[in-house]
């Protein structure tokens, strides 16, 4: 979602619905707090939220240089104008390409109403449930509602639950201060979670049994169960711990902070340093699919099989090596080249992941269809940059069977002609 939204916003004129005048965004938004409001006239929660946002705007304008810019998801210009004129905010004109670009690249699949907050320096602020924050604080007493840290949220719960000697005990949360904490977001009613549970039990047992420092981490269930009985059923027989079901603020806060919508999701937190924890890995499941316990604490790998982490393409630049028809020996060389290139690019602080595709699958079929690249017996290489306007690059020359890490790095640094996905 990092698409330089303010830069996009400032590329085209804005519209003031009250005065019906075009506004130069570079002048009106300069040295200001900027809030981008994604909303639509057909959205009932938006219509209910808009008056609260107007009240917040009026209170903030008394003491801050601030603008709210309305970005409409309406599909009818007449409805858009009728809705926009009810607000004192600036608006992105209905026909402006800026509107669609921000919806596609910044809002993405998030729901509405949605509010993004940018400080005077242009930095987007991480705010937990900003719509809820506005609703609770229309007087803007606590604006800009800084997000709680992971440590703050965890410590909302003074205890966690765990079976000790066959009895469910409450253990002080502060006992985990110097330990890694693995969070398991799941629900008993979710079949994907119940299917994954035996694998999780096995992983936890291995980590506790075979690692030399077996007591430097804990696994905690963060339950999304609908009823307390489901929670206890979920926890029955578990050797790991859980956030207490009654600590709803802690459970909900962790889900918001890590943007968890549905389980199973595993995340790894670092030990607390000066009271603060960092998120080592938001998505541990691919690590358990292709890695081993020796990889603990499971820092994200910047290489691998694309089928194990297909969502990575939507989030960052990726290089894909496709060789579905190559023999095992060639594929092994490709794998070694990918790993070596990835490690070398990491030393150069390159923001790119490298994936191989060794067998046809739904992901590779989609890639080939989108890039109009037919399957051949040759090794093929693509640089995909979906977050940057869905662009991609293909080498101008055929790839040799003895693909090297140097070949991959040269392609990354000089990919050639930019193209756009079909």
Image: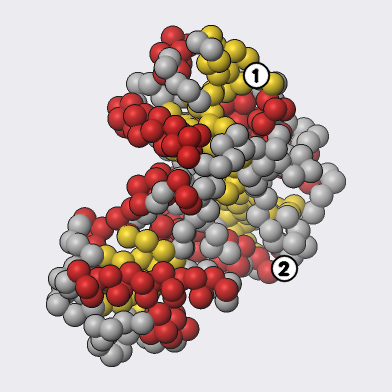
Q: CA distance from mark 1 to mark 2?
A: 56 Å
Which residue corresponds to mark 2? Answer: 27
Front residue of 47 and 35? 35
Q: Which mark is residue 142?
A: none
Occupied quadrant, residue 31: bottom right
Residue lying at 68% horizontally and 69% vertically, measured from the top left: 26
Is 283 on the left or on the right of 60, as rendered? left
Q: Which mark is residue 171?
A: 1
Is 81 on the left or on the right of 309, as rendered? right
* Residue 392 visible: no
> Residues at badges 1 and 2 in contact (C-beta under 8 Å)?
no
Front residue of 51 and 412? 412
Is 346 on the left or on the right of 174, as rendered? left
Q: Relative to 380, is 354 above or below?
A: above
Residue 394: image x %, image y %? 32, 81
Q: Relative to 122, is 345 above or below?
A: below
Residue 382: image x %, image y %? 32, 75
Q: Nearer the viewer, mark 1 or mark 2?
A: 1
Residue 6: image x %, image y %? 62, 62
The secondary structure type at the circle numbered 2 is helix
Report the number of numbered marks. Answer: 2
């Amino acid at each position: 979602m990092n698409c330089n939204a303010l830069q996009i916003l400032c590329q085209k004129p804005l519209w003031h619905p009250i005065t019906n005048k075009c506004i130069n965004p570079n002048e009106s938004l300069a040295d200001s707090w900027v809030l981008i409001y994604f909303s639509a006239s057909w959205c009932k929660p938006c219509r209910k939220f808009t008056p609260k946002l107007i009240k917040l705007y009026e209170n903030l304008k008394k003491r801050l240089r601030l603008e709210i810019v309305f970005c409409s998801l309406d599909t009818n210009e007449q409805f858009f104008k009728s809705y926009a004129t009810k607000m004192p905010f600036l608006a992105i004109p209905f026909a402006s390409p800026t509107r669609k670009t921000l919806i596609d690249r910044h809002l993405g699949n998030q729901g509405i109403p949605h509010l993004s907050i940018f400080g005077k320096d242009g930095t987007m602020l991480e705010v937990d449930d900003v719509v809820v924050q506005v609703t609770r604080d229309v007087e803007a007493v606590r604006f800009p509602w800084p997000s709680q840290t992971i440590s703050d949220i965890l410590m909302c719960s003074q205890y966690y639950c765990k079976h000790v000697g066959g009895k469910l005990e409450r253990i002080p949360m502060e006992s985990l201060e110097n330990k890694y904490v693995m969070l398991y977001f799941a629900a008993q009613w979710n079949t994907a979670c119940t299917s994954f549970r035996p694998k999780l039990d096995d992983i936890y047992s291995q980590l506790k049994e075979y690692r030399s420092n077996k007591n430097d981490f804990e696994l905690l269930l963060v339950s999304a169960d609908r009823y307390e009985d489901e929670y206890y059923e979920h926890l029955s027989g578990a050797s790991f711990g859980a956030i207490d079901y009654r600590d709803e603020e802690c459970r909900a806060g962790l889900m918001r902070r890590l943007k968890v919508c549905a389980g199973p999701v595993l995340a790894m937190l670092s030990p607390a340093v000066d009271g603060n924890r960092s998120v080592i890995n938001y998505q541990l499941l691919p690590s358990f699919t292709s890695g081993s316990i020796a990889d603990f604490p499971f820092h994200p790998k910047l290489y691998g099989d694309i089928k194990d982490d297909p969502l990575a393409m939507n989030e960052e630049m990726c290089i894909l090596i496709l060789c579905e028809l190559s023999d095992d020996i060639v594929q092994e060389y490709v794998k070694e080249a990918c790993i070596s290139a990835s490690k070398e690019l990491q030393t150069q602080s390159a923001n790119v992941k490298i994936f191989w595709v060794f067998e046809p699958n739904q992901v590779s079929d989609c890639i080939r269809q989108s890039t109009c690249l037919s399957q051949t017996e040759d090794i093929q290489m693509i640089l995909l940059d979906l977050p940057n306007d869905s662009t991609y690059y293909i080498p101008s020359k055929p790839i040799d069977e003895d693909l090297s890490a140097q070949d991959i790095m040269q392609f990354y640094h000089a990919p050639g002609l930019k193209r756009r996905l079909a």
